[in-house]
Each structure stands twice: as structure tokens, then as C-alpha cells.
Amino acid sequence: MRIKYFAFLLLIIPTFFSLGQVNEQATITELHQKMKAGELTSEALVKYYLTRIEKYDRNGKKLNSVSQINKQALAQAKALDQKLKASGLVGPLHGIPVVLKDNIDTTDGMSNTAGSYALAKNFPQDDAFVVQQLKKAGAIILGKTNLSEWANFRSTASSSGWSALYGQTKNPYDTSTSPCGSSSGSGVAIAANLATIALGTETDGSVTCPSALNGIVGIKPTLGTVSRDGIIPIAHSQDTAGPMARNVTDAVILLSAMVAEDETDPNVTHSNIDYLSHLKIDGLKGKRIGIARDLMGYHQGLDKVFEQNLEILKAQGAVIIDNLTFESMSQWDEAEFTVLLYEFKHDLAQYLSQTAPGLPKTLADVMSFNEKHAEQEMPYFQQEIMEMAQAKGELTDKEYTEALAQAKTLTQAQGIDKLLKEHQLDMIIAPTTGPAWKIDLVNGDHYLGAASSAAAISGYPHITVPMGYVHGLPVGLSFFSGKLKEDVLIEAAYSFEQATLYRKPPKLD
């Protein structure tokens, strides 16, 4: 569904960018330097992105990644430009346009929909806690991004990046291929340079997969360091928001602004990491890195690119320990899925209970809405995952508590922690996923494999960085480690990025 575009955009004319003064790879720090030097304004930056959204997202390749626009973005940018002149930067994201996945509450006149007609009129009364942090840091919420409907937790035959409300988002490197999901719109918007930075959310792979397939950086932080308030949930034991950016520096700047303790979040994880101090050019030196061989082997071309990058890691001073395997891997999927089904039913009802009258209040209400509006909501695939979740009981059920304990044990003490301890490792690596498969609305996604589950289920941090291309399609390298080990992961990811600089913008013209 094409969102109506606002008439004021017709008046927008690119300014400094048409003169080539700012490269799309410019970091937030570099943008701020130009702002302070009077060479750039936040207003001009917002205009530039709005023009690109019209040119490439609405027209041209019709990437369909940005679902809604904040009508107040230009006014907010002008106000921040005045504040800069009067008193300097208000924070680390001063005047920087950010887009939010369309499952995050914001009060900027945009609904929070999860891509569903059922929530098309869900206009939050409060910003999500993480959005509050971004605004405190000076960010401008430019718009919302499309996603796999209900964060890809509706059907086993879903197409990543498709939602009933907004349609199919496309990979900018090849619009016939999948952008992955569920944070598909956020990944595509950043890859196509439609905003400076983006927020995605992840339960299992929903930040890292679209980051890898769209050639950008994605960080899934330690569970609980970023508040889950105001985010349409799947499961509180795995859900987290995460930064998505074109470079490690911007992703870390965004992460730093996001991390704050929310007293209303029942499962806060305290972090006192100075994330920015770990952007070290020699960050790979001396790092003991294990290769998870059982998280690869599903694509020959992907494995070849991975092997080539091992030599770069070694050249940067890393110590490689090969042939690691997760002995518990075959057992954790079933436990995870059971947990997600239970928590989805419970957590979604909790979120919906705070929405306006007339909107669905339970998962059963959502399913009923879908059935009544099947032509709009279910033209390609059904809602069998929702049906399985609805059949589950309470979070006090023995089936749930045992599955949760098993999932955490298998991925923590018997998984990541075990490998790190046995081999004295700083981190584990594997190909993130990919390359992108063809969009298939009839049969659904064609996943071959991914490295996301161990970190996702355990709640441990995971960073993906571009590691090259397979047949012109981006692929990523995953770094993951133990709880609150973002510091060592950032060091390695930044060092690898700076040693390779693989990312090339997609050709949109």
C-alpha cells in the first residue's frame, strides 16, 4: 500500500548534498562537525532524506521501506538548528534523522501498526522509553519503516518484509530479492540512504539478518540493556531493540543513546559500558576468536567469502581457534519456539491493554480481525503461528517454565558460555546469513541458515558487519559473545570494518 506523500515535499530542493559536500558514508560525528562549521543544517539533512524517499522509496525502484513520515520533522529540525546556534549540540544525536521500525511507539503523529490493519489507528499517547532517550539525545524521528507483519510471528509461510498494511519491501541491491526481516524496512532505508540511522527490533535474527542482507551494520545488544517499553512484543525473554547503521561508528553512537535503565521494565540489565571508547582501530589485536563451524556450510559461495576474511582477521592480530561446535544446538529450537508461543500470547495482550478503545485487546481479537478482513490480511499466508500461540496457557504452566529454563541453559551454560570458557575465547564468529533469496509470496521465505539463534535465545550481544558480496548481494560477518560483552565485540567489529571497508552503496539510478 502506497502511503500518501505530503504536498510540502514537492517544494523540497536538495541543497548541500547536490554539491557533493557530504558523502553518504559520513558518520554522525562528521555530520556534527559540518553543522558546527555552518556547512550543514539539520533542516537540509531532513530535506535531503525526504527527497530521496520520494525518489527511490515511493518512485524509482519503489523500495517501499518507509511506511510513514513525521509531518513535524522539518519544524523539529529548524528548532534544533536554532538551539545549535544558541547553545551548541543538545546531545550525541542532535539534528540526526532516525527512522523507527513500525512496532515502536512514538507520539509524532504516526500510528504504531506492526504492519497490520488491526492497528492502523493505534496512535500512542506516549513515546516508547527508547524513543524518549533518542529525543533527549537530539534525534529527529523522521518516520516509521515497514516490517514483516507482527514481526514475522504470524505464519510459517510468510514473506520477509511483507505486511498487509504496507505491502512488500524490496532489497535495494536486487529488488527481486528479499530484504529479510522482520526489521526489513529499517535495513533497506539505511542501505538506500533514506535516513542516517534506524531502530530495528529482534527476537531472533530480526536486526542481524536484514542488516546482513542489506549490507549494513546491526547490533543486537544484551537483553534488558535497552527498554522494551512501548514496543509491540513477541517475547520478553528475547525481545530487544537494536541500532542499524551504515557503519560501526554510527551504530555504536546510537546504541549509546539507547541504553538507559527503565524502572518500569521488569527485567533491566545494568550496563556501565562506555561503548564509544571501544571504537579501536587495533581492536582485533590479541582477540581469541572461535569459528562456529556448525553455523555455516549451507551456501558454498558464502563459505568462500567467510574463509577469505579469516586471513584478514589474522592479519589484524586475531588468534583463530577453529572447528567449534554447539553440542546443544539441535535441542534449543523446540524449546525456544515453545517459549515464544507462550510469551507472545501473554505479552501482546499486555501491550494491547494500553491501546485506545476500539482496538484489539488480545491475540484472539487480532485473529478474529484477520479472519473478518482475510482478503486484506491473508491474501498470501495464514495465521497458524498465532493459532498455536492462542492454544497455549499461562506463564505458570510447567511446559513454559521448563522450556524457558531449557532454552536458556542450552544457549548459555551449555552453549556460548561453555565454548568461551573451554577455549578461552573473547568471541565466536560465523557468517550471519544469506545471501538474499528471491521474494516468494506463494511459498514464503527460503532461509538456508543463520548465526542468530544462540545469541538471541541466550540474550547475549551480537554484531553483524558487511564482509563482502556473493553474486553482487551483500553478506555479513557475525561476532557474538557472553553477557555484556559488547565492548570486545565493538572493538573487533570496528577493527574489521576499518580494515576492509567492504560496503558499497546499492545502485538506485
Image (tube, rainbow, N blue to C red):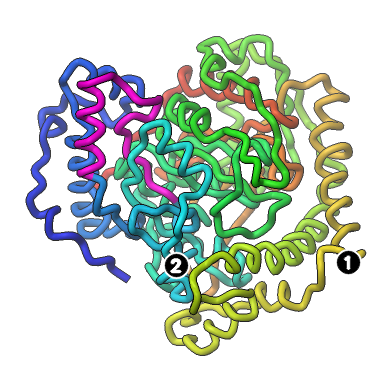
Q: Nearer the viewer, residue 103 or 473?
A: 103
- The residue depicted at 85 percent of the width and 24 percent of the height is 421
- The residue depicted at 14 percent of the width and 53 percent of the height is 9
Q: Nearer the viewer, residue 137 or 31?
A: 137
The residue wearing badge 1 is 397
Is residue 180 among what the camera can see? Answer: no
Q: In the rendered structure, find residue 452 and report the number of the disc placed on it.
A: none
Q: Position of residue 432 (x, y in %)?
A: 59, 41
Q: In the rendered structure, find residue 122 and report the number of the disc placed on it.
A: 2
393 sits to left or right of 353 = right
Whether 212 is drawn above or below 19: the answer is below
Nearer the N terminus, badge 2 or badge 1? Answer: 2
Q: What element does badge 1 sit on? A: loop
- The residue depicted at 38 percent of the width and 58 percent of the height is 170
Q: Nearer the viewer, residue 235 or 215?
A: 235
Find the magenta span and give its range: 74-100
Q: Amino acid at mark 1?
A: Asp
Q: Position of residue 330 (x, y in %)?
A: 83, 52
Q: Amino acid at mark 2?
A: Asn
- State yes or no: discs 2 and 1 in contact (Cβ < 8 Å): no
137 sits to left or right of 398 = left
Q: Position of residue 392 (x, y in %)?
A: 79, 73
Is residue 341 among what the camera can see? Answer: yes
Q: What element does badge 2 sit on? A: loop
Does the magenta-highlighted stretch encompass residue 59?
no
